Image: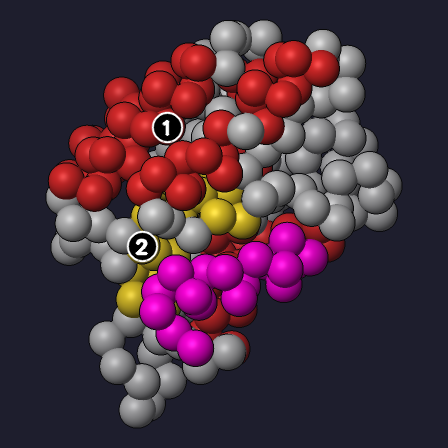
Amino acid sequence: MPVPATIQSAPDGAGSLTPGLSEPKLVVAFGDSLFSGYRLPRTQGFAPVLERALIADGVAARVVNAGVAGETSAEGLQRLDTVLAGLDRKPDLVIVGLGANDMLNRYDPDTPRANLEAILAALKDRGIPAMLTGSLSVPDRKKAYAASFDSIYPRLALKYDVPLYPFFLQGVLYHSDLMLPDGAHPSAQGVAEIVRRILPTVKSALAIQ
C-alpha cells in the first residue's frame, strides 16, 4: 500500500521570491517514491531540489511534492482529483511520474498505459499543462513485456503532445554513488543529478527559454 503523502511546497523558504521576479509558477510533482523523496531529508527530495534549481536559474517557482511511495498508476489516478482540489490555484505544470511500480508488480503494460492516459486526459480537460517522466522495464522481464512497457511513455507523450523526459533515473541508476543502498532510489546526490538533467525539459514545459 502506498504511504500517505502530505501535499507541500519545498521547505526552508526555498519558495521565497527574489525581488523583481513575477508570481511563481506552480509546479506539481505527481508521482511515486522517486518523486516523494524516499528515505531522504525533506529538503533533499525531487520537488524541493527542483524548486531551488528553478529559482537559481531565474525562474520564480513553487514546486509541490505530490509524490507517494509505492503508488501504482491506478492509485495515482484515484487521488488526482484530491491533489488538484488541495491546491490554492490551477497549476502551471503537473509533472507525471508513475508506472514503475506497475512494472515491478508485473502488471500488464496495458494497465499503466490506460491509467496514465486517463491522468493526461483529465489534466487536458482541466486545461492544465502536463509533462511525463518515463520509466524502463527492469532487465529480467521478457523482451515483449519490456518493449510494450517502455513504449508507453513516448506514445502517450506524442498522443497528448506533452514534453517527455524519457527515463527519470537516466545517468543515475547503477551508479552506486548516486543511489541509496537499495539500488532502486536516488540518494541526495542522485536527486541533484536528476534535477540537473531534467531542468531544461521542465523549463521548456513551462514555456521558459
- Left or right: residue 33 versus residue 71 is right
Instruction: Judge by depth and name the residue closer to the eye, 174 or 113.
Output: 113
Q: What element does badge 1 sit on?
A: helix
- Judge left or right: residue 93 versus residue 200: left
Please state the horizontal and vertical placement of residue 44, each as a whole percent of the image: 58, 53
In the rendered view of the protein, which quadrant contains the C terminus?
A: bottom left
Question: Which amino acid is tagged 1?
Answer: Leu
Query: 177 and 113: which one is in front?
Result: 113
For disc 1, the marked residue is 116
Residue 134 horizontal/vertical position (percent): 54, 38
Which is more foreground, mark 1 or mark 2? Answer: 1
Pick the quarter of the image with the N terminus: top left
Which is the main secondary structure of the residues drawn in magenta?
helix
Span of residues in magenta: 192-209
| Contact check, label 1 and label 2, Cβ < 8 Å | no
In percent of the image, x 77 and y 30: which residue is there? Answer: 183
Residue 75 visible in the snapshot: no
Kindly identify the amino acid type of the residue bearing the numbered disc 2. Answer: Leu
Upstream in sequence: badge 1 or badge 2: 2
Query: In 3D space, how far apart are the residues under numbered discs 1 and 2 (Cα atoms)?
Result: 16 Å
**Quadrant of the rendered structure where residue 12 is?**
bottom left
Query: Does residue 45 belong to the magenta stretch?
Result: no
Residue 11, percent across and down? 43, 58
Mark 2 nearby-residue class (10 Å; few <14, some 14–19, many ≥20) = many
The disc at residue 93 is 2
Position of residue 56 in the picture relative to residue 76 (left or right): right
User: Farthest residue in the right direction?
Assistant: 176
Residue 77 occupies quadrant:
top left
Which quadrant of the view contains residue 38?
top right
Find numbered disc 2 in the image and state the secondary structure of the residue it sits on: strand
